[in-house]
Amino acid sequence: MNPPYEYRDIPWKENAYEQSGRVLVSMEGIRESRLNVYNYEGSQLPAYHIYAVLKVALTEGWVDTLEKLHQNRKSKWKTEMVLISDGEKEYRLYTTGQKEPVCSSLISIANDQIQTFSILSEDAAPLLKKIMEDYPPVFLPRYRNSRKTNAVPVLHYLNALNLKFYEPPEPLKVQRERTQGIRVAKDIFSSGTFQAGETSGIRETIEALKCLEVLQA
């Protein structure tokens, strides 16, 4: 029997748009570490709450951990946002496989909601940076609340517990297979490419968004 796959089980609710659900989060694996986010019940997680959920689910210093994994990669990389249809986007990270470029990880967003994903942990920092730029998190609710508006997208999470499975949940396996099936143009690295060891910029993006939030309060 396989060892249990353990996830942080986070029930959440958002009063502004009357949404609630449960999301499971884990970082698994030793040889090939993966970050998994699984919309388990209820509404799918709004994209601007991914930072808050990861902050609850992962250990302190998770941003630095993901950035270190990213900077330890061995090959060049590139992120891209692809518009799939009206209201649906894919945030992809490309790198090099044996010889050809491959899409190593992707995160889909449909109707401003994060879809279940399973990505390589080393790909998380640059992908999350790009998503947070498009869907700024609420870092400092007290500043947003000073605007006297009822539409403040603040996440309230309940008791976060651990949940175990003896097999990876099927939606995570499906998402991994879908990523592997993406065909990548041979000239994808002709522009916008970064070399191994270059920063993702996620920390700078977070600090800039926090400052902007205070200035706009």
Image (cartoon, helix red, strand yellow):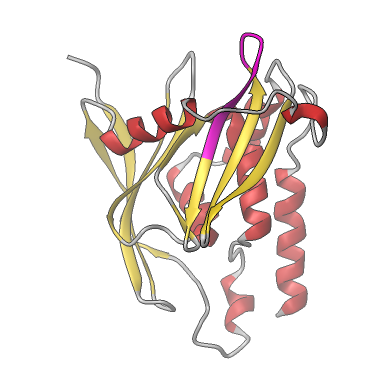
- Relative height, residue 138 to residue 58 (above, below): below
Could you say which quadrant of the image residue 60 lies in? top right
Residue furthest right in the image: 191
Left or right: residue 197 compared with residue 148: right
Q: In front here: 156 or 122?
A: 122
Q: In front here: 88 or 173?
A: 88
Span of residues in magenta:
97-106
Residue 5 colored magenta?
Answer: no
Q: Residue at x 61, y 47 (%)?
A: 82
Q: In front here: 58 or 110?
A: 110
* Residue 117: image location, x then y, percent: 43, 40
* Residue 4: image location, x then y, percent: 24, 25
Could you say which quadrant of the image residue 57 lies in? top left
Quadrant for the C terminus, please. Answer: bottom right
Left or right: residue 200 compared with residue 47: right
Residue furthest top in the image: 98
| Prevailing SS of the magenta stretch | strand
Can the viewer see residue 27 in this picture?
no
Q: Residue at x 70, y 23 (%)?
A: 186
* Residue 179: image location, x then y, percent: 48, 31
Q: Residue at x 67, y 42 (%)?
A: 80
Residue 100 colored magenta?
Answer: yes
